[in-house]
Amino acid sequence: MALPELDLMRIKLWCDDKVPKHLWDQVKVEADITDRYVTIVEVRPPWDGQGDHTRFPIARLRYTKTTGLWSLYWRDRNLKFHEYDIAPTVHVQDLLDHIGNSGDPIFFG
């Protein structure tokens, strides 16, 4: 199942705009894309300058092809995702706006 290309571009642009470019060497927000969902992750370099970057999941956007709806999921301390209490929508931007502007610390706390 392929995710809508326009929505994927919208998600990538949203991620790029979360952190100013001059800070990308310290922290960045990226989208990990699979066939059914997109996981928004915070990426940080290793604290000691050695090894791989840390990828910390923030939220997951799941697409249901049969309905054309996007759903929002939050991540618990055990790295398991649970459906967030917001109605699924055809407009992925509504969910991105909620993640960025709701003030809910469950996402960027």
Image (cartoon, rainbow, N blue to C red):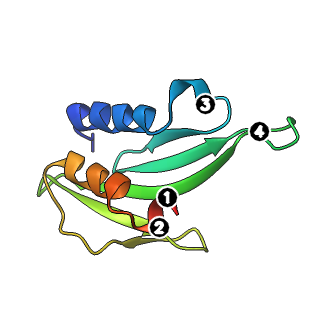
**Number of dots carrying numbers:** 4
**Looking at the rendered structure, which numbered label has been put on residue 108?**
1
**Looking at the rendered structure, which numbered label has been put on residue 23?**
3
Spatial CA distance of label 3 from label 4 is 18 Å
Q: Nearer the viewer, residue 62 or 11?
A: 11
Q: Residue at x 60, y 30 (%)?
A: 23
Foreground mark, 3 or 4, reads 3
Query: Could you classify mark 2 by the number of other residues whose Cα lies within 10 Å: few (under 14), some (14-19), or many (20 or more)?
Result: few
Q: Residue at x 24, y 38 (%)?
A: 7
The x, y position of residue 106, in whole percent, is 47, 68
Give the side of residue 44 with respect to residue 33, left or right.
Answer: right
Q: Nearer the viewer, residue 32 or 66?
A: 32
What SS does tag 1 mark?
helix
The x, y position of residue 27, in whole percent, is 62, 39
The reply to whether dot 3 and dot 1 touch (C-beta < 8 Å) is no
Spatial CA distance of label 3 from label 1 is 17 Å
Spatial CA distance of label 2 from label 1 is 5 Å
Spatial CA distance of label 4 from label 1 is 22 Å
Q: Amino acid at mark 2?
A: Pro
Q: Residue at x 28, y 35 (%)?
A: 10
Q: Amino acid at mark 1?
A: Phe
Q: Nearer the viewer, residue 75 or 21?
A: 21
Q: Nearer the viewer, residue 14 or 89?
A: 14
**Disc 4 marks which residue?**
52
Q: Amino acid at mark 3?
A: Leu
What SS does tag 3 mark?
helix
Q: Sequence order check: which comes first, mark 3 or mark 1?
A: 3
The x, y position of residue 49, in whole percent, is 85, 35
Is residue 61 something one can see in this rendering? no
**Disc 2 marks which residue?**
105
